[in-house]
Image: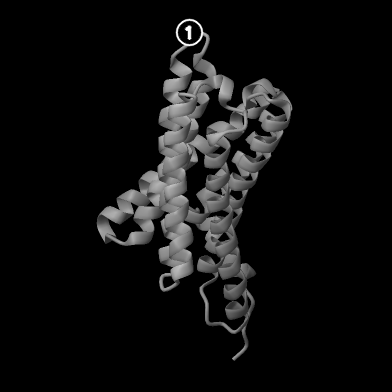
Amino acid sequence: MQLLALPGFLAFFFVSLWVGVRLLAQWGRTRQLPELLLGLGVLGIGPAGFGLILLAAAAGANDPQAPSLLAGLAAIAVGGGAAAKAIFNWRIYHPRSRFAAVISLGSIAGLAIAIIGDARSTGFAPSAWMQPGWILVRQGIQIAILLWGAGEALRWWLQMRRRLRLGIADPLVANRFLLWAIGAGMAGGGSLIGMMVGLAYGQPMNELPLLTLVLSLFGLVSAISLWLAFAAPEWWKLWVRNQAPNVST
């Protein structure tokens, strides 16, 4: 079952790496805030954080200290990626909202406190990965940020659908909102399932084969959504345009 799960995890790792680098390269040309925040978010949560988590889970057999060190680096990477996405949710979707600003900055402060608390109380030790404590606070905030972003993208997609019927919206832009909602939703939903099941059984993901397979499928769907949203091939763009409502004039 572990081998069946491997393609999904590899797809998520490499697609998020590719998309994150593309976004930062685009930011280097445009100097626009959305590309920077999305690039940092995708790279932090995807290849940096997720890759380090997998390494931490596999490193214990060779070096008892390695899992804690790698898990600490993963916490910082994922926390940084989630912070970038929290700022994106505020500055892009609600730039004038004080409430969104408080939620965004408050969640970043909560992430920092949880990472420091986890480091001081457990040292990111493997024995504490699936136990109540600061790690669950951190994971909860990260999941909430991802699901917040998915909800905002879904809301914009619904608005764009209404505009498409009037012929005043770009179908590719509308589709990108939907794909981003699916990608972020799968990442957040998979993390939520992993946290709840791991907490219930008191075991990390790599010791629960069925959970590993389910999370791999979530990762695969998230990877496909990211790829189509930010690096879609021409055949996909043509299909999306052909599916758009025809508005008679």
Residue at 27% from the left image edge and 59% from the top image edge: 31
Q: Position of residue 240 (x, y in %)?
A: 59, 64
Residue at 45% from the left image edge and 58% from the top image edge: 104
List the residue tagged with mark 1: 62
For this rendering, which residue is in front, 26 or 198? 198
Q: How many marks?
A: 1
Mark 1 closeness class: few <14, some 14–19, many ≥20 residues within 10 Å: few
Is 211 situated above or below 31?
A: above
Residue at 57% from the left image edge and 47% from the top image edge: 143
Q: Position of residue 57 (x, y in %)?
A: 54, 21
**Element class at badge 1:** loop
Q: Position of residue 11 (x, y in %)?
A: 54, 36
For this rendering, which residue is in front, 235 or 13? 13
Q: Decide if residue 205 is in sight here.
A: yes
Q: Decide if residue 42 is in sight here.
A: no
For this rendering, which residue is in front, 203 or 167? 203
Quarter containing the N terminus:
top right
The answer to which quarter of the image holds residue 4 is: top right
Quarter containing the C terminus:
bottom right
- Give the colour scheme shown: one colour
Is 45 situated above or below 62?
A: below
Q: Position of residue 113 (x, y in %)?
A: 44, 41
Is 211 situated above or below 39?
A: above
Residue furthest to the bottom in view is: 249
Residue at 64% from the left image edge and 36% from the top image edge: 195
For this rendering, which residue is in front, 22 or 82? 82
The amino acid type found where label 1 is placed reads: Asn
